[in-house]
Amino acid sequence: MPHDNNFQHANYSKSDPGSRVGYRTFQPGAALDCPAWVQAMAGVGQQLIKANVKGILFLNGHPFTDLFGAARLDEVGGLKRGYSRGISGLESLLALLRPDTNGICRQDDSIHPPLVNTEQTQQALDALAQEAGNFTSAYVRKFEHALGQGNAQLTRCSRYVWSSMNHHVGRVEAAMNLLLSLQEWGSGLNLSKEDRLLLIGHGHAGQVLALLSNIMTSGESEVRGRVFEILARYWQACPSETRSVEQLEQLYRRITDRNVLEGASVDVVTLGTPVRYGWDTEGIGHLLHIVNHRVIRTDNKRWLAKMELPQIAWEMPYQTGGDYVQQLAVAGTDALPDSPEAEKANVDFREIFEPYDGFERWLECTRRTTRCANDGQCLLVEYGVQLEESPRQHLFGHACYTRSRAMLFMATEIAGALYPQN
């Protein structure tokens, strides 16, 4: 895996990932809370303890937002400039991507981005989304309790709700805020260089973690300084009581002095995260990507998704090919910033992070049908067609990862991939 990624964008490769990819079929295993389930989860807890995993942080955002980044697609073209002419089925596909017509978003939802990671926000999100793309507080408590059954040590589990401002400047801010939160959380875990933290991010939270890996790189990075400068300039232009340039400067010094989390390793698992930002493997420890993927191609390239029009628009409501958010929310998509200052910062970040701009470039990227990120291990899991009929329940194949019935499966696969027993 490459080092010193320097905030470069990932490549959309159609080549076989080889030994980096594994294939699974989802099996729920023992019934939730039955003795066999409790024993299996406790076994995972033992693996984590042996690997010195001191804490697990579950991350997700607001699932009922512009998940596909259709706002940016429309801004750079979409139907307005005629790019869809001659491409059969594209109008139907765009209707499924837009939040106003895909059945996911509602104006009367109780909360909307930007979200703040507070207990009140978590409770509101749990009431609204339940387990659809959301790690509920009940889920996290159950996970921690199950890992600790019969074990002398306890792997602490917590959750983090990121702002869900799904554009470059929003994700950079989220990565900085997450790092500050990790510092505070880690101080209560008495971390050392031998310890590990495990971060599990659903969907676009994985993009925040990818940026975090570049920010935390142990190598030299001129681009990192540029990223901090752009964000500092934006914060100066839009002052807020919740953030300060001084705080940002202190964080930058801590990172460059390699004084983060007492030297503990940070392992990362992403769940259904679209391939976008590249990963800096010098900034993190183990890296694993889990993707809901059903093999429906006819060319034996089972590591690739399918992107054929107009068929894909017919398949999406039935999740025939797996996770369509992971497949389609690639380069060129995003929500739109909500102020001129944020848009200026977003443009500056786009020049660094993402050379893929414009509607036709997005279409080109989707047709690469890349499922596996360039770095880390990848598990392509056939979760099967979800029985829920509403897009707010299945999120077009993107909601399966965070459900309690998949807890044991996910825990077992993560432990086996990242912390195998000798």
Image: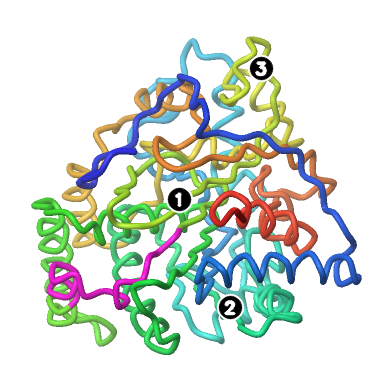
Which of these two is toward me, 31 or 67? 31
Task: Write the residue at 45% across / 63% down.
Answer: 164
Image location (x, y in percent) of residue 392: 70, 54
Image location (x, y in percent) of residue 158: 55, 78
Identify the residue under disc 1: 287
Crowding at label 3, few (<14), some or many (≥20) Cα neighbours within 10 Å? some
Name the amino acid, label 2: Thr
Which of these two is toward me, 7 or 153? 153
- Among the 4 quarters of the image, the one containing residue 166: bottom left
- Among the 4 quarters of the image, the one containing residue 101: top right
Secondary element at tag 1: strand
The image's mark for residue 155 is: 2
Q: Which residues are magenta?
A: 251-267
The image's mark for residue 103 is: none
Image location (x, y in percent) of residue 297: 66, 17
The image's mark for residue 297 is: 3
Task: Write the residue at 60% across / 42% down.
Answer: 291
Tell which circle, 3 or 1, labels the residue nearer the N-terminal end. 1
